[in-house]
Image: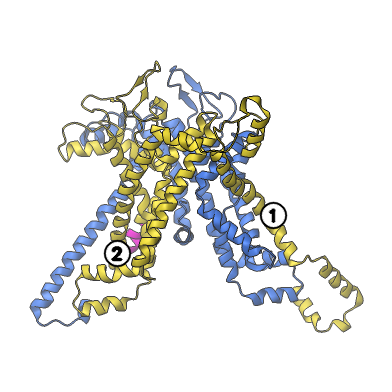
Amino acid sequence: MAAHEMYFADDKARKAYMTKKILSNVFVYLFLSIFALFLIAPFILMIIGTFVNADNFENFKNYAEFKELGFANWGFSNFAKVFNSKFENPITGEIMESKGNNFGVFFLNTLIVAVGSTTVTVVTAVLAAFAFARLQFKGKDALFALLLATMMIPGEMMVITNYMTVRMIGWMNTFAALILVHGVSVFYVFYLRQTFQQIPNELYLAAKVDGVSDLGYLWKVMIPIAMPTITTIIILSMMGSWNSFVWPNLVAPGNWMDKKDGHSMMLVSNGLRALFSQGKTLDAVKLAGSMVISIPLFIVFIVFRKYIMRGVSRSGIKG
Amino acid sequence: MAAMENTLKGTEVVMDPVKAKLISKRKLIQLPQWAVAWLVLIPALIFITMFMLYPIINTFLYAFIQDFSYVPGGGSFALGQFFAGLNNELFDSVRFGLSNFAEVLDRPDFIASIGNTSILVLVEVPLTIIVSLLIATFLNSIKVLKGFYQTVFFLPYVTNTIALGLVFNLAFNKTPGGLINIMLMNVFGVKDPINWLSSTAYTEGAGLSTKFTQGVVIVLYSLWNGIAFKILVFMSGLATIDSQYYNAAKIDGASNFTIWRRITLPLLSPQILYITITSFIGAFKMYSGVMAVYQGAESTGAYFFGTVAGKDGSIEPENIGMAWIPVVGWIYKELESNYKAPGVASAASLILLGIIMVITAVQFAVSKKRVHY
């Protein structure tokens, strides 16, 4: 209720109310701003680290030194250093050229895994959701309950056997292990099924009368109508692959020092950790590496903000 | 084409015989619904069976095979291991039992990891929920800059946990050049830089990190990482509350805090319950967030609690290393380490599952009285 809609006994009461309101507003904005600053601070540090002079950034002790040293000869050179394929072996100290084990390779790996696993996930989810939303068959409810039950079990339990399976069938350090093991997401099946169920029955009957097959109906009617949901799934799945760390860390744990010729199967998160956690990498280059990983996410966020926020509020999956 | 056929439907009598035959043939090819259903379910079912159902059953088997040891050639299937064991003289005593659980509970580092996780969960979950609840309430009450703040508060959600963990690590860890230490020393007048995370002292003045300083960084990072989603959920809950309630309360002269306490909280209780339960479950399974903060600790050998291997392989127990290894971290490390791993790791994961189920059940029981749907 706005102040002008309210009635006060006298001017004093109005004044007291207004003062209280202004004070509480100041408090609210102060609180929000402090936390906003806390949330933005790492990004600011990342941006600074990306552009400063990497060699000088290391040893400053106060703000003045930092300003003087860090911003002498600042520029984009840290990006080039991120993609550099020359590394110093932290134990022997020798400079090694590693063609198959640099950030470019990790980027390409991640792109392949993201596209591959998103394709597999979306295809399986669309088909399964179609069966559950539209078709009648024996055992449908039981099967659906079974799927629901698997959602309750923590993924860590599956990881143990999956890791053994991957080792047993020789999928360690392969795209197959990174893409296929998470080839179906039960949550996406549920999410899509809900959308599919909202499509009116009459459309299906009309299509049937026209002699359109079930799969034809899925392709020509349901998928176009459910496209916003499918887009959300594609974006969340892509972001999930881009950010995945735990599973790739187990099944594609390439150590760059062991591999001189073959190319690493690490994804960006693991690569960042493996390459830049070595003490010898300059801090500014580490920050630039974080920036390189974050930029694609920011672009996707800016372009698809609507889809992402809708999908996230439904799923709670860390994108 | 479809439309044309539709008009033909009613006039089938006058349709030329060739066309009629074609249509009836197409009808014949069409599979019954149940067949189509199972056909389209095949891809999903293959993946679910292989990588979800089978692993769940198998993990139980791993956990309950007495003295589980991996037998080469036995495959990943626990019973395959079992039978391979039966045929092998060395393993002729394979049977079911609780030895894996006994071994897990006998390991001090596992007990420590349960303690670590519990402390972090108990600090981090209430803190994150309270902060995001406050932010959501405040965000809901303002008009100017609302969209801007909403976007800012959602930003941490679309970031890479490892990449931003590295940023936190650098901000805190570099002594004395880290952002936080610079601030503490130049703005707040702290004398010596604090060694927040590192198990080695690389500058004079900065001592070794303690479990407390490491914990502070981990909690701050999980707060940073965790509030975005909670704010989003609380905001969508607040949007559904009818403003009439607020107006009525204001007319009755209720203070802002009373309104928040008596109207907002009860009406938001379903969202609060949902967030509390998912946060507790998620926090008990914490892994990446903790690992991300400890960038590079493995490369110095500082993996396990309280011990750091020196370059000559000696153990220096005074160094603290990664003091906050969570349960899931313990499971994964175990899984990669030795031949007994699957059994022990499975037993540990079942214990984790048990803890999570008990906590969830308790929360549901408590919430029955307090949640208003």
**What is the secondary structure assignment of the residue under circle 2?**
helix
Q: What residue would you read off at disc 1?
A: B42
* Amino acid type assigned to the residue bearing label 2 in the image: Thr
Q: Which chain is blue?
A: A
Judged left or right of residue B268, residue B352 is right
Classed neighbour count for the residue bearing mark 1: other residues with Cα under 10 Å, few (<14), some (14–19), many (≥20)? some
* Range drawn in magenta: B146-151
Judged left or right of residue A274, residue B194 is left
For the point 19% across and 65% down, which residue is it?
A24
Q: CA distance from mark 2 to mark 1?
A: 47 Å
Q: What residue would you read off at disc 2?
A: B137
**Residue A135 sits above or below residue A4 on the image:** above
Judge whether residue A9 can be spotted in this image.
Answer: yes
* Amino acid type assigned to the residue bearing label 1 in the image: Ile
Q: Is B70 in the magenta? A: no
Question: What subunit carries mark 2?
Answer: B
- Observer-nearest residue: B4 or B123? B123
Q: Position of residue A291 (x, y in %)?
A: 41, 41
- Observer-nearest residue: B8 or A190? A190
**Residue B74 sits above or below residue B276 on the image:** above
